Structure formats: C-alpha cells, structure tokens
C-alpha cells in the first residue's frame, strides 16, 4: 500500500504504535502539540539535529529502510556522544513522496526505534508531509550532561595527545565498496558505513575523565581536527603511520588502490570520536579502551596555533593537512 | 552570489553571525557538536518540530525570504503556545538547491532571527545541506512549562465552554487571495497567512488559569477540535453563528463567494488557539482577552463522547463536523 492510499492519519497511527514502547518515560508523548519530559536535577540539556536526504546522503539501493532508520538516529547520537551526553529523547520528521510504500516507512521507523531502544531513548514526536521528490529525514536528538560537564571542541591545550576511536576510513571504504558492488566481501566496512555505532559510552567516559577536547569525525579527521584547533586556538601534528588501520580496511585498500590514510583524513561518515587528553591520562585512556572494547589510538599531538595543522609522514617530513572536508554546496564538493 | 559559489563553511559563518546576538544565553552555542543550555529549576522541557517545504507548504513568490524565515519559526512557537510553554531555544535545518542566492538564505535567517528576538529565544544550532530541488526547512523548538503545568489536548470535560482566539479562517482567506493576486486589498488577511503571531502569552495565561484542554488550530477547527475530543474522550457542539468573523474576512468572503465558517472549520494555518474552560472561568477568560488585546470568543460547548462532534446552524439543526482536515498524502488532500 502507498502512503497516498493510507493517508496521513492512518500513517501516523502506525508510526505512533511503533514508537509507543518507551512513551511512558515522557510526561506527554507523541499525540499532543509538543512533547513534555523532565530534565533530571543537576543536568543541562544537549541538543543536535541532522538532515538526511535521498540523493544527497544516501541512495535507496544502498541500505534497507530499517538500516536507514537506524543510521538516521545513529548520526545524531554520535553528536551527543561527542558532547559526553546521555541520550534523552528524539524527534523524527519525514517528507515522503506520495508513492512511497507504507511498509518502507514502517520498516524505517522500526530501524529507528531499534536504535533508540539500544540506548533507551523514547521518540517524543515529529512531523510528516509530502515531498515532491526524494525522501527527506530530519532528526533532532536531545540528551543531558552534568552541569558544566560537556565535552567541547574548545577544550584542547598544547602538549595534549590526540586520540581517535575505532578505525577511521572504514565508512568511506564501505560506501565506495557499496557503490562498486563489492561490499559483500567486506562486511565490517559495509557495517561501518551502514550501521555506525555511536560512541556514547566512550564520550561519557571521556567527559568524566576530564579529557581536553572532543568531536565526532563525521567529516573526516582533517576537517574535524581543524574544528578543534580553531575552537581551541591550537595547532596539531598527526602522524600518518599512527592512524589505526583494521586488517579488513588494509585488504580493501590493497585491492582497490586506496591509501587508508586518505580515507581516514578526508573520507568522513565514520562517527568515531577524536579527542585530546593530557599525557597524565595515558593509562586511564588505555584502561578505558580495554573496558569498553573500543580501540583508542594515539595519532598525534596538540601544538601551538602558529604551527598549524600538520600531517607528518614516516620520514618526519610535515605537510599542511588538506584544508577542506566535504562541502555540500560547492560544485566540486 | 550562489550558495554553490560561497560553499558550506562560508555560508555557515554568515548564518552563525546572524544568530550570534542571543548566543550568550546558551552554555554552548552554535559551533560545537551540539548545543548545551540550562533547564530552569522547577520546569519541564517541551519540544516540537515542523517541516516546511517549497511546493508543499509555500511557493516562493508568495512571501519574501524574511517572511518565510519568520513564519518557519512562528508555526513551531504556536505549538509551544498551545502547550502553555515559555520559549527556550530553536534549531534550524535547511536543505538548499545549489543555485539558491546567498542573500535569500541570509534574509531568511534574518526573518527567523527577528521572530526569535520577539520572544527572546536563542537559535542553538542546525544543519545545512544541498537539496536536489526545492527549499526544505526543518525547525525544532524547545521551551519550558512549570512541572505538571502543560496545557494538554486531553484536558477537556463535558460541560466546558469551547473558545477560540482571533479570527479563524483569516489565514486560509489570505492564502487564497495571494493565489488569486488579490491580497493587497486585504492586508490583514495576507498578514494572517504570511506572518501569524504565535499566541504565546495567551497559551501561558490559559495554562496558569487552569483551563481544560488547548490546541493550536493549524489544521482548521474541525480537525483540531476532533483531536481534543479524541484525546479527552468527549464530544463537542460548535455554533456556526458564533464563529468570530472580522470585517475584513467578511468583506473578502462576500467578494469571493466564500463562507467564513467553512474557512474557519477546514482552512487551517491560522495558528490561533482553541481551548475549553469551565463556566466558572468565564469572567477570567474575558478579562484575559482584554488584557492581552486578543479576541477570545466562545463558539460552543463540550458534550459527552456519544454526541460526537457536531456543528449547529442558526436554526438549531446539528450536522456532524466534516471528518477530515488537510491530508498531506491523499491524492484528493
């Protein structure tokens, strides 16, 4: 059945039913003019929002509707993770072409709901309307941090170590393999692109540890490290040979002639965390990595602002980090 | 200059500058992974979100970019008003065709910022990306109510009086006059559609007064009263001759052969408040109307659920209220 046959009210009923399971955690759930919920004492609100458009951020054949639903929330949760926040609740808006199958929408919502369930987050509301062409999703996610406890881009200091979680570049490799029809041979890389795991535990633990600055590397290490440097008024030196490369990423790069470092620096969509921490926290960071089962790899050091953002190769020669991440508007973007 | 020439980073800089004036009220404003702000003690969070799409909700020639920016926030503020909430902060996402003029975007943001300024609301973040076709805007607005003090759709009781603010039908008349190229003769109706005033003061005062149920009539009185009846488990009887009609609306209806009651019941986009209050509050509601300078007109009464939602004409004959408001997906919607 198409959404144009079912109509708006019928569609909303089906969507609300999917999101009903955690509604009791809200004072006022979906169904009123707005959602109402508590702000736990001693906390501040943390809010972020992302657009996800067909043809811009994804192509339908790339991922199932449930995978798309899951990822739509995951990319927002990654922003909460980068702030060290605990998930609160989410709002989901969808603009749908009238010839969209109802099942596509409900499967999307089930994937969204599954991701929300993994982090115990109610879906508090949203909006639906007709789109002339292409599916458009807008997700807003709210969470909380202890008062004054958010992990910021502006917290880096000269001399701190730069770390990254996971294996950056994996998502970019996964996307290219999907485009090339070769992703089945590399399930880990496909998963890195299709079903990124927001690093909520890592972010919360880092914020509690009192590390310097943190950001999620949705735009690639080069662009996102530059954000930290600008906001903190520092420079940075990254060592190319220290960038962590998984065996699967190494294998894919060898097969396709890619440089893993290029994918990590410029690829984007990894939703891993980049952070800085003073030398004295080295053991604590290593222990955290073990406890959470997430690689946290040191890849460089925070320098003075005058030194800029530099990439060092194995021979010790430094080059300026590429200036740009992905640009949505430029013709060559 | 086009957004594709300026690029994403340059555009974000210009947008951030426009929204910088109230940023100091946020702990972390635009520029980090997420915004951080306080939840005042003794309050709950109230959040709502709306999509506004070119070709679906508006046509560009209908309104200036600043008017569109203003309205994009106003429709969300109306949802906060309907909950009796005080505005907190807003998030703004825009998907832009690459050939959009930068000035269109900055004018849009100035209009959005002006509306935010009127209600002392900081803009806390958002997202931008490329759209293949047509401008898409997603706005999320948060506010606060005293704990347990939200005005709900579910609060109506049998015997209460039904009121409406302003002159419903004005926005629908304004839109039709704009489409017909006749809006200049009816500036009040044009304004009702282009620049609706969210009834924040009315909503907060009504919640404090302890009225029954409240909703904003974005979908027209028929559809939105039905929401109240369903959520409250009641029926309703509306008297057609009591629907308030401004002299300008009367004049436009006479000229174009419209029935003002039909516009009020089915037109939508009014962003006025519909609410119910027990008889004992009659004087308080009348005083409030005078204090705020907003007409609050009694249009009917809450009945038992079995009676349904009925429209009474002047002769005392009742007919069932039309079932449907605007449906985004139905072909005949």
Image (cartoon, coloured by chain):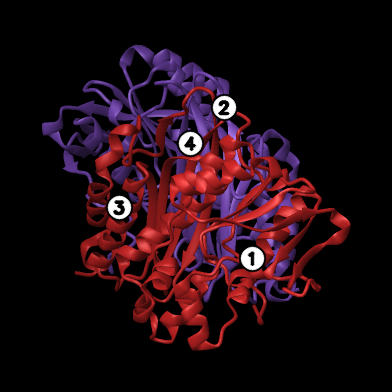
Chain colours: A red, B purple
Label 4: state its secondary structure. Answer: helix
Tags 4 and 2 both on a single chain? yes
Task: Check disc 4 and report the residue beneath it.
Answer: B80
Distance, label 2 to label 3, CA atoms, is 48 Å
Distance, label 4 to label 2, CA atoms, is 20 Å
Label 2: state its secondary structure. Answer: loop
Q: Chain of mark 2?
A: B
Name which quarter of the figure residue B121 lies in.
Answer: top right
| Above or below, comparing residue B254 to residue A257 in the picture | above
Q: How busy is the neighbourhood of tag 2: few (under 14 within 10 Å), some, or many (20 plus)? A: few
Q: Position of residue B5 (x, y in %)?
A: 73, 76
Tags 1 and 4 both on a single chain? no
Q: Which mark is residue A114?
A: 3
Q: Which numbered disc, 4 or 2, marks the residue closer to the eye?
A: 4
Residue located 75% across and 69% down the image: A312
Q: Which mark is residue A242?
A: 1
Distance, label 1 to label 4, CA atoms, is 50 Å
Front one among A277 and A51: A277
Label 1: state its secondary structure. Answer: helix
Residue located 55% across and 52% down the image: B72
Front one among B91 and A2: B91
Tags 3 and 1 both on a single chain? yes
Q: Which mark is residue B293?
A: 2
Q: How busy is the neighbourhood of tag 4: few (under 14 within 10 Å), some, or many (20 plus)? A: many
């Amino acid at each position: 059945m198409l959404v144009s046959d079912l109509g708006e009210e019928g569609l909303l009923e089906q969507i609300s039913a999917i999101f009903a399971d955690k509604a009791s955690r809200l004072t006022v759930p979906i169904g009123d003019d707005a959602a109402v919920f508590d702000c736990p004492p001693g906390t501040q609100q943390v809010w972020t929002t992302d657009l996800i458009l067909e043809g811009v951020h994804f192509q339908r054949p790339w991922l199932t509707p449930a995978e798309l639903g899951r990822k739509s929330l995951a990319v927002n949760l990654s922003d909460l993770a980068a702030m060290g926040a605990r998930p609160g609740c989410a709002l989901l808006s969808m603009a749908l072409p009238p010839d969209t199958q109802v099942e596509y929408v409900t499967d999307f919502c089930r994937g969204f709901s599954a991701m929300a369930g993994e982090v115990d987050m109610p879906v508090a509301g949203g909006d639906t309307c007709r789109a002339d062409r292409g599916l458009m999703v807008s997700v807003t996610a709210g969470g909380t941090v202890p008062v004054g406890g958010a992990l910021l881009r502006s917290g880096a200091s000269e001399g701190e170590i730069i770390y990254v979680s996971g294996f950056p570049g994996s998502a970019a490799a996964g996307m290219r393999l999907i485009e090339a029809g070769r992703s089945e041979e590399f399930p880990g890389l496909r998963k890195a692109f299709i079903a990124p795991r927001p690093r909520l535990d890592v972010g919360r633990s880092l914020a509690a540890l009192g590390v310097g600055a943190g950001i999620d590397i949705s735009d690639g290490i080069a662009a996102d490290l530059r954000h930290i440097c600008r906001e903190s008024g520092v420079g940075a030196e990254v060592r190319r040979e220290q960038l962590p490369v998984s065996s699967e990423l190494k294998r894919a790069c060898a097969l396709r002639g890619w440089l893993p470092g290029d994918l990590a620096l410029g690829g984007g969509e990894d939703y891993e965390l980049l952070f800085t921490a003073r030398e004295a926290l080295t053991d604590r960071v290593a222990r955290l990595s073990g406890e959470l089962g997430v690689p946290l790899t040191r890849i460089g050091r925070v320098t003075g602002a005058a030194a800029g953002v530099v990439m060092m190769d194995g021979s010790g020669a430094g080059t300026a980090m590429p200036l740009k991440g992905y640009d949505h508007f430029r013709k060559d973007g």
